[in-house]
Image: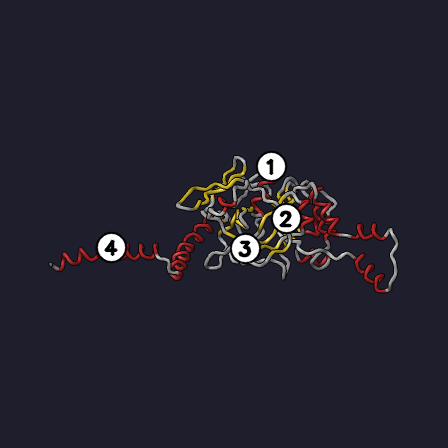
Amino acid sequence: MSRRYRHSLFPILVGILLCLLSLFLFLSNNTVVVNLLHRLEAIPYDMRLKLSIPRKLDDTPPIVIVDIDEASLKKEGRWPWSRRKLAELINRLNQQGSAVIALDIMLAESEKNPASTVEAVAKQAKKDLPEWFGDIRQTLDADRVFAETIKEKELVLGYIFHRKSGIKHGAIGKSRIEQITPGQVDLLTAIEMKGYTANLNAFNNNAAGAGFFTIIPDLDGAVRHAPLIAVYDHQAYPSLALEAARLYLLEDRIDILSEPIGEVRAITGVKLGKSLIPTDERGQILIPYYGKQKHFPYLSASQVLHSRKVIPLLENAIVLIGTSAFGLADLRPT
């Protein structure tokens, strides 16, 4: 074999070896290899995302962040706030014409009623309280005030799902996903959850909806995906974002679209009326980031509480109530 022929054959052999290596890596189940491939795929995606971020939000509905920030805590007092104050905040947003209010916080514990302290002191002193004290207890019950406030308002409560079993706190509420039989749900390739930390049942009973805000980072720790649905105890549940979108679009239910693949049903998307949202097989979407923090308008919670003027930003808006205060904010790499 001539040297010239061997030289012409060398690039072909290298190409074949590279193809075989690529095929091996692609089909490998080795954790290190899988993590490496995910990371290699993420690098060009991140670069493309940064180059394609739009400068304007012309085609999106108005979305406003009401921030329980440092200024709010300084003015209104430390967290957790009384449910009375949260009820007042929701009333103010409703008066400003907000279309949907979503809570990116949880109210999983009962607020102590001051009347309980009086009752404890009276019991210790072996004194009977007057009959009218029962009315005082009702008046001072901040949880009751909050539950009554959110009734008949377009408000979505948020909660957390856990992937480890043994945690069940609060109530996750009724799902508006068009429920298929438990056996069919178990065939879905959705993310399966094992536990939850949620809101008081009295709040769930009066809220217009509820959704989880659990996020599962990619293998490198960055958040690029968000699940729109998750399965818990043989039922499918919507995310906080999806449930807020359902209320905003005035839809009564959410449908899961799937295709049979072998013995399972791979998710292809979710449907809100005529609106189709494509997802991956786990029911996740790639988050369409629009820019850096505060790209969407932010309003301090204390500003909303004390404003005596109309705030145009809030009219017909989807309002997300969360916190950026030090020690409360949920910081993640994106």
Q: Secondary structure at mark 3?
A: loop
For residue 185, above or below residue 80: above
Q: Rounded to the nearest whole Å, what is the CA distance between mark 4 and mark 2?
A: 56 Å
Q: Is residue 147 visible?
A: yes
Which residue in the protein does label 4 denote? 16
Q: Secondary structure at mark 4?
A: helix
Which residue in the protein does label 2 denote? 157
Q: Secondary structure at mark 2?
A: strand
Q: Secondary structure at mark 1?
A: loop
Relative image position of residue 125 (x, y in whole percent): 86, 64
Which residue in the protein does label 1 denote? 250
Q: Rounded to the nearest whole Å, what is the CA distance between mark 3 and mark 4?
A: 46 Å
Mark earlier in primary sequence (3, 1): 3
Q: Is residue 13 left or right of residue 319?
A: left
Mark earlier in primary sequence (4, 2): 4
Q: Rounded to the nearest whole Å, what is the CA distance between mark 2 and mark 3?
A: 20 Å
Q: Rounded to the nearest whole Å, what is the CA distance between mark 2 and mark 1?
A: 17 Å
